Amino acid sequence: MLCTNFFRRNLAFVRLAVITNLEYRLNYFIDAVLQPLMTAGIEVVLWIALFQATQSQQFAGFSRESYLSYALWSGFMARVSSNWMYEFRMIFDIESGGINTILTRPMSFFEYYLSQFLGYKGITTVISFIFPTLLSFYLDLPCQLERFPLALLLIFYYLILLFIFSFIIANLAFKLTRVGSLTIAKNFILMILSGELFPLDMLPSQLKKFMLYLPFVNGTFAPTAFLIGRTDVNQISIGFVSITIGILCLAPLAIYSWKKGLTNYVGTGA
Amino acid sequence: MSGFVIQTENLCRTYKSYQKQEGLLNSVKGFFSRKYVEKRALLPTTISIEPGQIVGLVGANGAGKTTLLKLLSGLIVPSEGEALVLGFRPWERKYDFLRKISLLLGQKNQLWWDLTPNDSFQLLTKIYGLSTIPARRRVEELSHLLDCEHVLQTQLRRLSLGERMKMEIIGALLHEPEVLFLDEPTIGLDIVAQSKIRDFLRDYVHKKSPTVILTSHYMDDIAILAHRLLLIQKGTIVYDGSVNHFMETTDKEQVVSGKFQAPLSKNFLLPGNLELNAGKKEFHLKIMAENLSTFLPALIQVGPIDELKIEKVDFEDVMHQFLQAESSIR
């Protein structure tokens, strides 16, 4: 019974995310399609320019097509594996007292936002990944679509880690009130560590080796590189292990920050 | 603690806040070093509330009534003391406890801004683990009683304040809570909406007998709905008893108002040190009930009267005077 209630409730939160986001069509279209399309477009243009300017056939052992495919897919992967929107919402709820509604109902703040976050990412993935798939075929770029389910599974597992990270940052709002700048700083660091800004193949080999063991590469680099055939399933396995270690490390901190936060909470707005 | 739905023992809460002096220089100073002050919003409070009671919690802004409500609904953790609501420590927020209570905040939306009320109620049905068909029937029944079936399919953000509050009430009552915390349920509403909601709540508690803690700045809400009155002043309960008893124990004043046939030609001083000024026709005076017998003959002697009305001071005035008096003592 408890289990059934849990699933019914969380399914309802997933549904809530889909309904809410589809309500504002233009905003959703920009977020799920236009923004990653523009990011990917800019990166593709930059790589074309770079190859033309240097007259090279390869960089760090990979072809022009491989980089173009990376640029195209990484823009969309990075969009799916980011969490600034729900992080800001959690922070705002704590700052403004919106959390009161959640605290006085039989549900947890964590599950409420995690389910919504995953629901939103689910619908975004379905819609936004149509574009790089079609473009890959049209431009004849390397892409092994049979690898897509595993790449996606890795991203969604990474999203849980990312969410815990966001949850900890949001909990700081109980004490510090305004923590939005932390989200921005964190996003910038993740942009580099995940390989969103540039493929990690361009880094010195020792540094790249080290970074491939960090869980953050599973946001963009690992799934993209796997999908376009740059890496094999071994990197995906490392990814699952590093994310699991990351979750195990962050979970106690998340629990502690939540409990501490609630002790400080003053029930804002009520 | 048996026999009581709510029981607290020396329950108190202290807030810590940063004190900032005005000006740019102090802002820069405050960036490096801050001075924190502690404010005891609720002093040790011990109360017991029986099942089915409607308790009106009244006090000025900042008196501590919302803090008490937040503590009892589990929204905040106490600094000291103990409380049991339905046998649960509220701030532990056990799901079995949360399924039995409801907190309605008049100043804060609790339903989802972007959803229609129907979508919100469906979501609440899942959150509270209710069966779909009875829950739907309940929404129909409550919306019929509140006369708001026509807005169930409109996004919450597009509703008027009164309609929104009706939706919030349906959302708060959907799971038939045993304890209902109502914080300013009629705030900001026009008189018609206020009385509609008041009537609805009165009928609802009559039928379902939940225990209700109600705070309101509209004393009519308290006078009409509450069995018991808790007056709170500067974090302390200063009165705990029935509304009627409160009215009896406070000074029995009467209001005498009316109009003379012509403006007064000179000033008059009446028993009870009450003054009537020259040139005025209308009068509105407050007098102690026991002085009426000497006051009225003297008033008639002043001149021919056109209109005369004697009324009891209303609940709101008595409350106001009481809190003012308490405030000056403390």
Image (tube, helix red, strand yellow):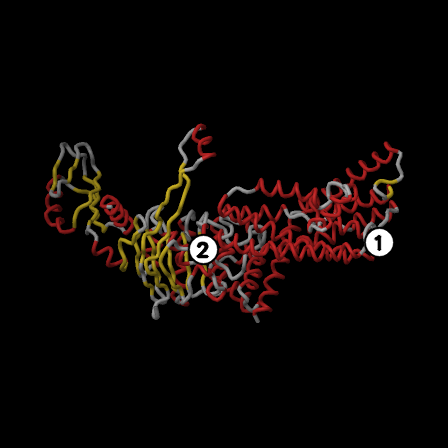
Residue A219's place in the image compared with B18, above or below, is below
Host chain of mark 2: B
Classed neighbour count for the residue bearing mark 2: other residues with Cα under 10 Å, few (<14), some (14–19), many (≥20): many
Tags 1 and 2 on a common chain: no
Q: Where residue A30 appears, x then y in whole percent?
A: 70, 43
Q: In front: A20, or A146?
A: A146
Q: Residue at x 83, y 57 (%)?
A: A146
Secondary element at image label 2: loop
Q: Is residue B163 visible?
A: no
Horizontally, residue B67 falls left or right of residue B171, namely left
Residue B112's place in the image compared with B203, above or below, is above
Horizontally, residue B51 falls left or right of residue B323, namely right
Which kind of residue does numbered mark 1 sit on? Gln
Which kind of residue does numbered mark 2 sit on? Leu
Disc 1/disc 2 C-alpha distance (Å): 51 Å
Residue at numbered disc 1? A144
Q: Residue at x 71, y 57 (%)?
A: A240
Secondary element at image label 1: loop
Host chain of mark 1: A
Q: Is residue B242 visible?
A: yes
**Residue B99 badge:** none
**Residue B75 badge:** 2
Q: Residue at x 48, y 55 (%)?
A: B166
Q: Residue at x 74, y 51 (%)?
A: A127
Q: In front: B220, or B55?
A: B55
